[in-house]
Image (tube, rainbow, N blue to C red):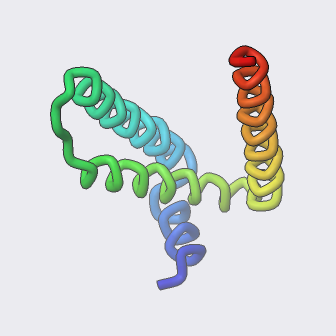
Amino acid sequence: MDEVKVYDKAISHYGIKRQLVMVMEECAELSKECSKIYRALEAGGTFGIDNLAEEIADVQITTGQVQRFFGLKDKVKEQRKSKLKRLAERIENENCKNQTDIS
């Protein structure tokens, strides 16, 4: 199955406006699932991860359609790289600070 072809067909069939709404809905469902897992962790309870995997997949698919429609592949790739670098730097800086605090 060619992801790009499916994305193109979905946008052609449903339209970009409807798929933008789907992104919003899927992000909300992912947020809700994360909240459930957070509450379970806080309470020391158990939780399943199948729903989490499903919601992540839904968000990836719908955002993939939007990315494809607006031609954002390279921009998203650049942003991911930049944000991952910033995250790594933040973690490194916090590790250095924690080591200084311990000394």
Q: Is 40 left or right of 20, judged from the image as shown?
A: left
Q: In the rendered view of the protein, which quadrant contains the C terminus?
A: top right
Q: Nearer the viewer, residue 78 or 7?
A: 78
| Residue drawn at point x = 36 percent, y = 34 percent | 34
Q: Relative to 51, is 94 above or below?
A: above
Residue 51's x, y, as percent?
Answer: 26, 49
Residue 95's x, y, as percent?
Answer: 72, 30
Q: Is 13 left or right of 91, judged from the image as shown?
A: left
Q: Relative to 36, is 102 above or below?
A: above
Q: Nearer the viewer, residue 4 or 75?
A: 75
Name the residue furthest top.
101
| Residue drawn at point x = 57 percent, y = 58 percent | 65
Q: Quadrant of residue 5?
A: bottom right
| Residue drawn at point x = 71 percent, y = 34 percent | 91
Name the residue furthest front.
103
Q: Quadrant of residue 94?
A: top right
Name the residue furthest left.
45
Q: Is 83 left or right of 64, judged from the image as shown?
A: right
Q: Quadrant of residue 68?
A: bottom right
Q: Relative to 49, is 33 above or below?
A: above
Residue 63's x, y, as percent?
Answer: 56, 51
Residue 24's x, y, as percent?
Answer: 47, 36
Q: In the rendered picture of this protein, how many numbered marks are placed on residues?
A: 0
Q: Nearer the viewer, residue 22 or 73?
A: 73
